Amino acid sequence: MAFDDLPQQNPALDESLYGLDTDEAAFFKQQTGIQDDDELKKHLLQIQADAYAVFPYPCIRIFHWTKLKISRLFPYPRLLNLGRDRKDAIFLDIGCCFGNDVRKVIADGYPVQNVVASDLHPEFWEIGHKLFRTTDTTYPVAFVPGDAFAPSHLDVVPPFTLASPPTSPKPSLNTLTSLNPLHGYVSAIHASAFFHLFEEAEQLHLARALSGLLSPEPGSMIFGQHVALPEKGLRKSWLTGRSTFEHSPESWKEMWEGIFREVGAEVEVDARLSRVGEGELQRTGSGTPVTRELWWMEWVVTRV
């Protein structure tokens, strides 16, 4: 399942993996108020240590959370357009961790009152407040903790259509205790470094669950990025030696189109594969030479 791909012995944190480019440094300085580079580094290293103690995700260790990932995905301008042009367009970031991507989206103009974040570990959201020096009062984003596989948090329902829209009232985001009241009302969903944590059947389950949240309005979208392969199959993890399932762009497209076809709806799926460079592989600091190719897939599923 999700976390079987983690090392049996968690590798120690490695300060040499830290590094911010110009845009990343500017973002964290603006959001935290810390202008000194050394003080900012000390602050982020402490946040990393706190989070690694909660759950040792590899992306925490390699500072993947500092990379402004969402704003570098090709569907990102469309997300900002939805926030600007569609009245009360709800944006959900699932698997939000510290809320870094949420903060970037809001900083770039998405209305804060229309944003929802969710993660399995509520501790990460609290660490996010520590990271950005905020509180629930000073930064009132709706955060809904929960397990995406638990029906009480996110039940699987068929995608809604224009001919069969949701009949329940649109919820107030600040009253949410699960994601279920959002069925059929979410304009955009972001899920990065998320699907690849799970096996093939579980990825299908998640895709069905997220599809039921999506608004039937044309242009509503689900997008993100995760590890993939040119041809779907098993990939041996460089961290653990275990094999995990990875989709290809073709199988990814087939999965989403099939889900919406069941209700007579159509989606456009754009999935783009890119190979991670050798230098970036070395930056993971796995402690052993990496000889396998690693591929990332950026993707967006859009209702038509």
Image (cartoon, rainbow, N blue to C red):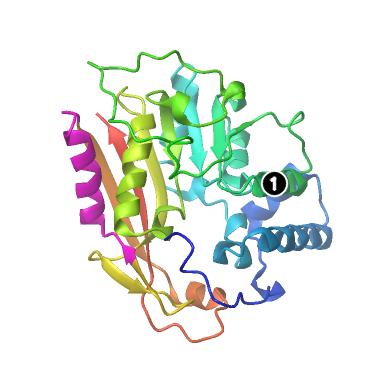
Look at label 1 and name its amino acid: Gly
Where residue 248 appears, x then y in whole percent?
26, 60
Residue closer to the observer: 31 or 187? 187
The residue under the point 34% across, 48% down is 299
Farthest residue in the bottom direction?
289
Q: At which x and y percent is residue 26?
A: 69, 50
Left or right of residue 41: residue 19: left
Q: How many marks?
A: 1
The residue sitting at 29% across, 70% down in the picture is 234
Which residue shows up at 20% across the image and 41% down it?
A: 257
Residue extent of the magenta highlight? 245-265
- List x then y, in percent, for residue 295: 36, 66
> Does residue 74 appear anywhere in the picture?
no
For disc 1, the neighbor class at 10 Å (few under 14, some 14 to 19, many from 20) is many
9 vs 185: above or below: below
Residue identifier under label 1: 128
